[in-house]
Image (cartoon, grey):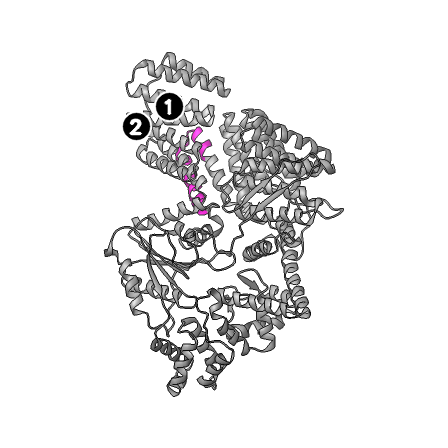
Amino acid sequence: MGARKTSGKRKSGGKKDKRPGQGQRTGSSFAGASFERSQVLGSGTQTTKINVQAYAAVPTALNSLPGLPQEFTGRDDEIAKILSILDPGSGSGAAVGSVAGLPGVGKTTLAHAVGHATLDKGWFTKVQMVNLRGYDPTPVPPEDALEALLRALGVAAEHIPPTLDEREGLYRSQLDALGREGDRVLILADNASTSDQVRPLLPARHHAVLVTARHTLPGLGARLFNLHPLQPDAAVDLLHQRLEVADPDDRRVEDEPAAADELAALCGYLPLALQIAAALLADDPDQPLSERVRMLTDAGTRLGGLDDGERNLSAVFDECLTRLSHQEADLYRLLGLHPGPDISTPAVAALTGQPADKITPVLRQLVRARLLTQNSQARDRWSMHDLLRVHAQEQARTTMDRDRVPRRRYEQARARLTDHYVRHAEAADTHFRPPGEAVSTLFAGREQALAWFDAERENLLATTHTYARTQTALDLGFALGRYLEWRRRHQDLVTVRAHALEACQALGDALNLAGAWSNLGAALVKLKRYTEAHDAHQTALDLIKQIDDLHSLASAWDGLGIALSGLKRYTEAHDAHQTALDLSKQTGDTHGQARVWSNLGTALQELKRSTEARDAHQTAIDLFKQTGDTHGQAIAWSNLGTALQELKRYTEARDAYQTALDLFKQAGDTHSQASAWNGLGTALQELKRYTEARDAHQTALDLSKQTGDTHSQASAWNGLGTALSRLKRYTEAHDAHQTALNLSKQTDDTHSQAIAWNNLGTDCRGLKRYAEAIAAAERAVAMLAHEEDWALTAEAWAELAVTLNASGADPSRVREAWEQSAATYTRAGDDEAAAASRANAESPPDTGP
């Protein structure tokens, strides 16, 4: 594992922020973002083009359906048609239905009703819902929809893997597991706007998906259902029932039947519009229906623009505002300035410039008016329905366009809100910096700062995108990095780092430009986009050389070294880290030296200079102790364990991994705990303590499942299978290694696949399935040689030789395999193992697994 430094935002006359890296290189593709730049010109000028996909709020998938409103009516025919394709007896495979219709037509409530009907019939054991927010400015991407569904299926939010492919694989495996247990799940994908949003959510079999959208979605292979407005009688019945829910003695519909018919018509027979109108009537029990009809008519609309997207309900929403006080209507419009999916009371206070205790009663009045929703779990958070948010945004724009005075007032409100987010994000970020640096008192401690970041993440990302190419995007791009890295939200990390870079260029901020390039390079490493990371770090390095900043120069060289290691250019990586170390020593930066020693040790391991690697990691441990960095120590101890294993000092390696494990627990790093348990299991196997090794790998597997990290799960399954094989439980070992192979294929990790094939060969030999064993071993040899992992290639040749000998193959084939093993061990620099293979070529050992 390598540790690295994150470039902080620089202020005139100040020093750049620094921080240690996590030491793991976990990567994935970054869907929707591209980074193109010219070569650095002789004058030091760069031409950069950055396209960044902003992500909408992560939705919340529900574990159970909400109850249907009492006034739900008039949809029996539609429900029957949809049920016809969800009936388990109607066919094989996954059923897919798509409900399309106008906004406010009741697609979501209809989906709820269908869900209840399927549960009542016993067709499904669970219904999961996810709001795709397809008509927001930034719809929910499929990876975030999968995150919501994975949460509901029992995967912890902070443990969900970063890439779309990994999430899709984990999601399908979870559903397949439920299917094998006899469970069927109905997925309700609400508010979709494109087929691409939905396609990754489609299960392979057993289960079903019902999609709601404003238009049909081609390419899903779905049965299409067009949902129309209610019939007139049903619309009036909805009004009547809704008023009776509020007051069983309300007789206005019976008293004014003609006005009720006209009101239903003015609402376009749309359930949402009818419900809003009924709520307003319920809030004013003395208002005649005819007066409500006149209000809608006098507003100059009869909801005629029903085919015009979100604007179809503008008349209803505008009419709602006429019932508000001036202060309430003003707050409603101001909330339209907020770019995120929800807002906290302190943020509303900043937006309005009023104390929280003064603005809270006004927020509650908007809740009464059905224009705002108060979060039932977090009572200081408020949100609007997506269509209401659009309406509020339009209202804000209209107000700003009306006159210079309100425009200035709204611009000031917007500035207060963005300042609130920037100030709090920068304060929270201080609690993620290396020990010894000053921390803000705005938060009581790291846990409170982390909780604030978690609550505001979607809003901060939306704000960064909304204010692209501005100082706000620059500030948030620097402040969010450490938090996003800790939560392993690597796609978001690249997004905000790219925004910060773009803002630096747009603003002509030369002071922070190098740091922005360096931070982007570090983020790209997390996604294994090593070539782009290399170019970003090289650009940062070229810029820093112009300003002669030794701290930044050391960080840039260190980051470049990590990228070079990712490209398997280990000698160059070693030289880059050595340069970084020399510069860190010049500056007296103890923490920087610790970080670089750790990265240098990792490069030395790749160069098979294990003794030097051990010494480098020990030095890193000592320096991290001096700075009080517990997490940095844990990374260095884990790396030391790996180096000690290479030196065949297995007892010391076991102790190093145990120390790392204890420190990772202190730091609350579950992902790294899994890695340490896996390393501990490997060391225990070498000590022939196979039962303990099996338990260690099982713990690693359990933790990896918690984090949802497919790579880690594959490694744990491989280790578990090897321990089981050593215990001669070959059938279980084979199953474990097959699982490891399947997971490695999901992540396209060829190296892990090769290891799994080699292990499968050993298992098949133990089961006396020699033909399969030989085929697996030969495949492992070819794949490992292609990966240029000569040590493991030599080991695979040795496994093939043993299998050939056990199968009774021609002795010449056995001898050739041992000779290939010896030659490859020599190429890997392991002369002792090479000598053993040469001896076996002359006199093959007894056969056996």
N-terminal of the pair, mark 2 or mark 1, is 2
Q: Amino acid at mark 2?
A: Glu
The magenta stretch is 681-706
Horizontal side of 589 relative to 692 (left or right) equals: right
Q: Amino acid at mark 1?
A: Glu
Horizontal side of 14 relative to 709 (left or right) equals: right
Tag shown at residue 648: none
Residue 543 visible in image: yes
Whether residue 686 appears in magenta in the rendering, the answer is yes
Which quadrant of the structure image shows residue 517? top right
Quadrant showing the C terminus:
top left
Question: Which residue corresponds to mark 2?
Answer: 772
Horizontal side of 49 relative to 78 (left or right) equals: right
Q: Are marks 2 and 1 in contact (CB under 8 Å)?
A: no
Residue 847 visible in image: no
Question: Which residue corresponds to mark 1?
Answer: 799
Measuring from the top left, give residue 394's x and y in whole percent: 56, 67
Measuring from the top left, give residue 343's x and y in whole percent: 56, 63
